Image: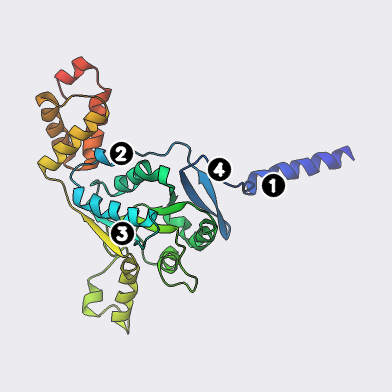
Amino acid sequence: MKTLIRKALSVLHRLDAILPPEIAAPDWDNTIAFRWQKVGNAGVLHSLPCPHTFPLSRLAAVDAQMGKLVRNTEQFLSGRPANNVLLTGARGTGKSSLIKALLHEYAERGLRLIEVNKQDLATLPELLNVLAQRPEKFIVFCDDLSFEDGEEGYKSLKTALDGSLSRRADNVLVYATSNRRHLMPEYMHENVGNGGEIHQKEAVEEKISLSDRFGLWLSFYPFDQNDYLAAVQSWLADFGLDWDDTARHAALNWAQMRGSRSGRTAYQFASDWAGRLPEERQVFQ
């Protein structure tokens, strides 16, 4: 009997290592950011206790895009009609940062942010069913979104945005960022009709139909030097550092070495500059 019990316990321990953890309800009252993860045919919401967020005022050179995104978000929070939003354009120009900063500005008004990775989109309809029962306002955040040929997650996203028989939940919007305007790869042969597809136009329409389901498109462009320096100055202020000629010269050298002027490059420089000792800032390398 003892041998049998030991074997049974051994089997249970091995099963415990394989089976997914027991799904617990998220802490709705004390959490403002979550991550949705696919588990089987459904999913689970993980609370993010320390989300990366900051004031909108910390972002530079994106005032036009910020104004439109803020207006859409305030319409949403006020219970008025609002659109799903697709933010596209140059890398490092503040697309994701704008969405994260919304959480800082509007969490007290009931806004919650839920990050959903591309591989978990297949269970997005299940997430929407969960959120529809809640009083809060939710932004489903899909960062760096794009799909390759053969990936099926975009079909679930299309249905969730617009196309399901069920009415879209009034308390959920989707905000997505991407470097691609149409989210799907496009090929030259699709324009000349020699790819083997009989109904070539229909195949192209299928690819662009996903981005069409976002009602608001915001485009982001590479920073010029003034935009970049304004972003550096803003992030240095966030670290409590002064803006002077030494910092300006160092910031320009940093961008030249990176071969990029963007909000991301500005933040990376500011982090490096803030981490240096005062005497180390006098000689930039």
Q: Amino acid at mark 1?
A: Leu
Q: Is residue 250 left or right of residue 184?
A: left
Label 1 Cα neighbours within 10 Å, binned few <14 / some 14-19 / many ≥20 = few
At 24% from the left edge and 74% from the top edge, which residue is drawn?
189
In three-dimensional space, the C-alpha distance between marks 2 and 1, rounded to whole angstroms, equals: 46 Å
Residue at the right extreme, as displayed: 1
Residue position for label 2: 55
Which mark sits nearer the N-terminus, 4 or 3? 4
Label 2 Cα neighbours within 10 Å, binned few <14 / some 14-19 / many ≥20 = some
Q: Is label 3 or label 1 in front?
A: 3
**Tag shown at residue 27:** 4
In three-dimensional space, the C-alpha distance between marks 4 and 2, rounded to whole angstroms, equals: 24 Å
Q: Is label 4 or label 1 in front?
A: 4
Q: SS for tag 2?
A: loop
Which mark sits nearer the N-terminus, 2 or 3? 2
Q: Amino acid at mark 4?
A: Asp
**Viewer-closest of 42 and 54:** 54
Q: Quadrant of the N terminus?
A: top right
In three-dimensional space, the C-alpha distance between marks 3 and 1, rounded to whole angstroms, equals: 42 Å
Check contact, mark 2 vs mark 1: CB within 8 A: no
Which mark sits nearer the N-terminus, 2 or 1? 1
**Tag shown at residue 86:** 3
Which mark sits nearer the N-terminus, 3 or 1? 1
In three-dimensional space, the C-alpha distance between marks 2 and 3, rounded to whole angstroms, equals: 21 Å
